[in-house]
Image: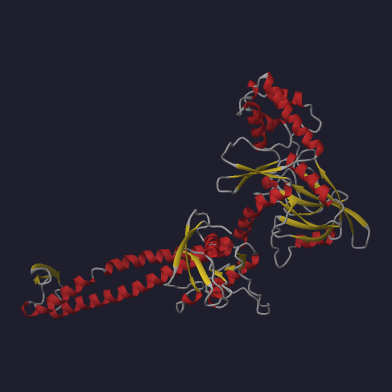
Amino acid sequence: MPIDGIFLNLLKHEIEDTALGSRVEKVHQPSKDELVLLLRSRAGSKRLLLSASANSPRVHFTANAPDNPPNPPMLCMLLRKHLTGAVLTGLRQVELDRILFLDFDAFDSIGDRVKYSLCAEIMAKHSNIILIDETGLIVDAVKRIDFTKSQVRQILPGLPYSLPPSQNKASLFDADTSRLAETIALQSGKTVSAALLSAIQGMSPLVCRELAERVTGGDDKASDLTEKELEKLAARLETLKETLLTGTGEGYLLKNGEGKPAEFSYMEIHQYGSTYSCVKYGNLSAMLDDFYTERDRLDRTRQRAADMIKVVNNAVAKITRKLVLQHAELEACADRESLRVKAELIGANQYRLEKGALYYDLENYYDENRILRIPANPALSPSANSQKYYKEYRKAKTAEQMLTSLIEQGRQELQYLETVNEAITRASSGAELDEIRAELTQSGYLKNRRKKDSKTEKPLPPLEYMSKDGFKIFAGRNNLQNDRLSLRDSDKNDLWLHAQKMPGSHVVVSSQGGEIPPSTVEYAAAVAAYHSKARESTLVPVDYTLIKNLKKPPGSRPGKVVYHVYNTVYVKPGI
């Protein structure tokens, strides 16, 4: 569910209760559509996230602030100039529209007091974040809108800010809910949910469907509402109005059968029956943080790693095409033994063969002396024809050896690229992506973009977990880190784990000189399964062995190890 006007109103009260009077300590811009304000008060500090992303526009406090780029964008520098040190004095919402103004008291460059408003417009692909001065002029915006993008409303520095066109819907703040219910019933041809959506301001399709479900047990035609159902609808709207007037709301997060967030709302949702489970939150920001964090991480990873993903996918496609051709050539070499037989038969019978024949009919002593017709070049002598077949045989034999080696190299390279793709998918920060970029550069897939005078960054530590038995468990984030963890940083008696025959992290349990109990082995195996391509599977085979049993083949790609002594355990992925 996108954030609707009623949800935004409840968020407004939540932000006011927590952050009103707070001072802006820092401003960050993690991506082109996102801003993070670090607000500090006597009660502590909070990070307020504002997003104008088309997929997830929103405003809420976050405990999972995304990583910031090494160099702040120009807009971020402008916002820091105007808002750093400013005090949040108020929040305003235009009726129940999805527009929220954050008002700040600040000081200009010469110390005079000035006022700014940061406007968050939560409107899907038209979402925006706009800085407005006290005269109503636009200072700048996350998305600049000129005449080529909109003839109706432009968002450019120096232009006066104007609100989006009104939708002329009724507001629950001042509406008579009984009359509003009667108005809904007059909308012939529409279902109850569609009539609610078109008549009342600030309501999402999800909430409209839920109200229809609670009133009619489904989503009947609005004109078919009975007197009793009209009373129920008016009562539901009155309850919603009371929630708005008191400014108190709770969050409800719907999860699917796999436990993944699917929908959210400020009211409990019953329309899906037992398909989804419902988790109640007392804090709307915490619910939005849980809902969007994982999805935004994947979107952000795809944006930052777009060039790497393109290079890897192109390399995979190129190698796949090459392997298809090599397999075809190898199949052609499979008949090389027949070439040797023909050469040998001609050589054994050349005393009775004459030059100029188009073919030779000879007894094949390899096939019970059946007659074998062998094509011949009439311009060559029988001896020369025999040597010609021997030459083709040796050529096919050499080609088979070379093709077998090349096919194996291509197969190994495809496996390596699959591990890189999987590591990109698991990456949760810009630093992890930078390490993968360095790996691809080292392997020759990417050009080195590092400046000569830049400092060498310290490698990231592996992910760390702790078993209930008190043993430390480490998981590599990428292939380079897998190599360091397994071959350099671990003791020979530590336990090594990896999801069987699939891309994933190297996982190491530090033995600390003691014996590792089965419960720790099982937990470490679950960690290895979780940090692998089989994360979504229900049961994953995980191999485990001692570090001393690992060997790295000479010249192999990063992350490649071999082992022959091992055990296997089947576990459900988890951390």
Residue drawn at point x = 82 percent, y = 50 percent? 18
- Expressed as whole percent of the image width and height from the top left, the position of residue 341 reads 16, 73
- Expressed as whole percent of the image width and height from the top left, the position of residue 399 reads 31, 74
Residue drawn at point x = 52 percent, y = 76 percent? 493
- Expressed as whole percent of the image width and height from the top left, the position of residue 441 reads 56, 73
Q: Residue furthest top?
A: 227
Q: Quadrant of residue 42?
A: bottom right
Residue drawn at point x = 31 percent, y = 68 percent? 330
Quadrant (top left/top right/bottom left/bottom right) for the C terminus: bottom right
Q: Is residue 176 above or below residue 390?
A: above
Return the residue nearer the eye: 115 or 217.
Answer: 217
Residue 113 appears in the picture as rendered? yes
Q: Quadrant of residue 43?
A: bottom right
Q: Residue furthest left?
A: 352
Left of 516 or right of it: where is 150? right
Return the residue nearer the eye: 412 or 526.
Answer: 526
Residue 160 appears in the picture as rendered? no
Left of 31 or right of it: where is 350? left
Quadrant (top left/top right/bottom left/bottom right) for the N terminus: top right
